[in-house]
Image (cartoon, helix red, strand yellow):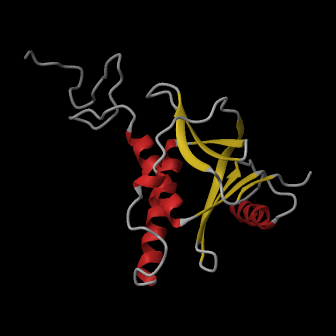
Amino acid sequence: MSRQVFLYDPPDRFVAGTVGLPGRRTFFLQASSKGRVTSVALEKTQVAALAERIDELLDEVVRRTGGNSPVPAVAPTAVTDTAPLDVPVEEEFRVGTMALAWDGDEQRMIVEAQALVELDAESEDDLAEAEEKLLQDEENGPPMLRVRLSGAQARAFAKRALDVVNAGRPPCPLCSLPLDPEGHVCPRQNGYRRGA
């Protein structure tokens, strides 16, 4: 079966968002253009890492060009997107591998999210070989979402993604674990609560 590539060049909209309540949220990347919508599920840590790496890559582009690139230093308010995900949110696949690149000729950020694939391997060497073969197989690899963004779109995506990640449950002031609405068993209190 040939690889399915969901290509958005450029998207009308590319955002990170969630479905569900804090503590039980499912994270998604969603790209849309001309009535077509693609949603892929991923972990909260993947969203955070993607946003951080996008900002780092854009900062490097600005540094290397001496500020003469169309990449803004911060996310422009004109392209800020705070709307919820487009519904219905239908997961195309769960993300396993992500990649970023900067196309200097077209001044575009390329974001790729590839489906999670389980590999059977007898040893570490076999696993490394299978992973490399999978990444090199353009025709028969797992499904992939590929999005090409302007510098402004990429900055806006990164800002929103970090905001979405940080909008979860607040941390406990003692142990930094997330506080649940139902309560929190704090390891630092060791089951003991002092009176006020």
Where does residue 171 sit, x and y in percent of width and height? Answer: 29, 35
* Picture layout, residue 74 above or below residue 142: below
Where does residue 163 sit, x and y in percent of width and height? Answer: 40, 44
Residue at the far left: name it. 196
Please tell me in which quadrant of the rendered image residue 113 appears.
bottom right
Where does residue 131 sit, x and y in percent of width and height? Answer: 73, 61
Of the pair 21 and 84, the residue shown nearer to us: 84
Residue drawn at the location 70% of the way across and 33% of the way down: 90
> How many discs appear?
0
**Is 148 positioned to the left or the right of 7 in the image?**
left
Residue drawn at the location 35% of the way across and 19% of the way down: 181
* Picture layout, residue 194 above or below residue 11: above
Please tell me in which quadrant of the rendered image residue 64 appears.
bottom left
* Screen quadrant of the C terminus: top left
Of the pair 56 and 24, the residue shown nearer to us: 56
Residue drawn at the location 51% of the way across and 30% of the way down: 25
* Picture layout, residue 141 above or below residue 105: above
Residue drawn at the location 38% of the way across and 67% of the way down: 73
Please tell me in which quadrant of the rendered image residue 94 appears.
top right
